Amino acid sequence: MGIVVFFQNKVFINERERFITVSIYVNKEPAVISPISRNSGDTSASERDKTLGNPLPQGEISKDALIEERIHEIKAKKRIEKLARLRAEITETIKNDGRRQISKTATQEQNQTHYAGRNRGDYIENIKGIIQKNWHYPELGRKGLRGTVVIFIRKNGVIDIIDFKSSGERLFDISVKNAILKSSPLPVPPEETEIELRFSR
Amino acid sequence: MRLLRYLFAFIIIISLKETAYGRLFIDINEPLTRPLSLGIQVQGEDSEVKKYTKELLAVISGDLTYTGLFSTIDDKLFLELPQTPFKPENWRPLGADAVAKIRLSFSDNTLKAVLSLYDVHEGLQIMKKEYSGEGVLLRTLGHAIARDIYRRFTDRDPPFEAKILYVGLVDGKKSLFIMDWDGARPRRLGISAESIISPRWFEEARLLAYTVREGRKWQIRIIDFNSMMQKRVFDSSSLVLAGDFLDRRTLLITHTELDNQDIFMLDLETLKIKKLITGYGIDIEPATSPGKDKILFVSDRSGSPQIYLADVSGYNIKRLTYRGNYNTSARWSPTGDSFVYVSAVNGKNQIFLQRFDGGEPLQLTDRGNNEEPSFSPDGRYIAFSSDRDGQWKIYIMRLDGSEQRPLTTHYGFSPLWIK
């Protein structure tokens, strides 16, 4: 993790405005999920545990700040309940075992049971529709971008990202990752599958 | 032994190939359109700066949302205080894609800010930057921060720090003004005359050319924005208009000769003119391409004013507009792939966008009269003059004609973007 420091001197016309900026970059380019190496097609369960949504490790927070935080959290929880009622979107729930998972929407729950055992073609069509529906990008954004993601769909429909090829634009990459995040877990697949998703605009 | 090793390698290669070919592909195109959801928090370190946090937030938020690529989250929904360390689980329920936390402080007559930018899905900090400046240049700071956030996501340059020059009115006389791209801080340059027309900008040398008329006397002047020195370069008792610069030494102008207007090249050092485009009828308003190899101009050689294209040599003249019978004011997009012009529609002037690679012209305005379009440096926004409100004012809109809004509350005409 290198630290780069440089000065920029900007002089503007007519005003004698001066702006000096000092840039310190940390985490220059965040390592996206690194590809898992394959040993003759058999990958252990621990490697599979690279699910989406790993929480940021907590740093040191003072006790006072913690208390203040708690107060705000409680106040905000009330607001959140109201928000969740108003927005028919995906919400985060914390399961009993402490692991975080994206909860399913009604339709996905339906699909969960129906698609087990159906043929591959139908399943692919179905998940294409789900991911497509969850993919948002600004209307006025760049055109002609392409991003590729290789995903692994587990037995229970949870998606693992095993390879990610950037489109060249962070905005596009975020929208793609978001689409996959929102789509997980997918309906139960006929079998565990690896799929390459090619996003393009 | 060696043979075995080669065989082993061969098998590995074969098996890898099969894995590559065996994979399923799904093509997903045409996303649903929605901007990136951004949470912005500004924290004032001490009482001195607390009064500035609102305005700073407004500048950053205003810049980013006008691009149409970002939407900001209402701060009433925030679960985290600005000073609380970032936690992605506080932002995911709000549907946030990214969070910007800005810490503002003021000491020793220096305004300082620290921007920390976070990707909510990755749960990572993706940028940290410090800013400092003399005095309280709050809006300048806001535009710089918005610029960096924009760049981080799009790898493009935004117009947030550009200025717009325009002709305003003071005590019945025309005067040159300059304002921020968002209409803030209009200030007057010390030039006024009975009439100021057709300002043109040359970025590489930071030169401004404009035309002044006092009674029956026309004059073209150049201002060097590096030295803020002004120079008279052409005088005439008949109509002359400054056109675009060809290079730092050559200005294209419209000049009247024997009651007829033609396009000339004016050498800014010798102050001599040379005819470039002439012909039956009038030829005016030359605009140069970004590559400075072609020009657009207005000519009525066909019987009505239309937009024409020519090489900078004056040859290969081609007519471009066929719709409408009064088309003027053509300007090139900085991207080089399209141009805007003004066309009379039902007795009013409207702004149209036309791509060079064909297609129908796109009408961008429809209320009142709309004239003098000027592209932003990145080619995504157009500033123009409109009287839709009863008075001529400077307006701005996106390239597709959306989000049209006034930039001035007072008289304004002939806007010109300056980087």
Image: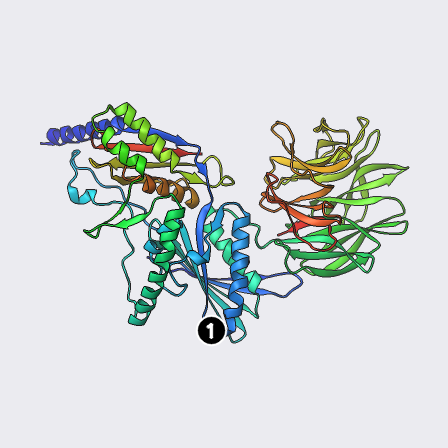
Would you identify the image quadrant in which residue B194 lies?
bottom right
Q: Quadrant of the N terminus of chain A?
A: bottom left
Q: Secondary structure at mark 1?
A: loop
The picture places residue B311, in percent across and down from the top left corner, at 70, 33
Q: Residue at x 60, y 35 (%)?
A: B337
Residue B5 pos. (x, y %): 13, 32
Q: Residue at x 45, y 46 (%)?
A: B36
Binning the other alpha carbons within 10 Å of mark 1 as few (below 14), some (14 to 19) or many (20 upward) gives: few
Position of the C terminus of chain A by quadrant = top left
Q: Residue furthest left?
A: B1
Q: Is residue B329 visible?
A: no
Q: Is residue A118 visible?
A: yes
Chain name for mark 1: B
Q: Residue at x 21, y 40 (%)?
A: A37
**Residue position marked by numbered label 1 in the rendering:** B46
Residue B342 horizontal side relative to residue B15, left or right: right
- How far across and down, in percent of the image, does residue B373 sit? 69, 43
In this orientation, which residue lies closer to the viewer: B26 or A90? A90
For the image, the number of numbered tags is 1
Across and down, in percent, residue A68 comes to: 34, 68
Q: In this rendering, would B210 be left or right of B128?
A: right
| Quarter of the image where one finds residue B188 | bottom right
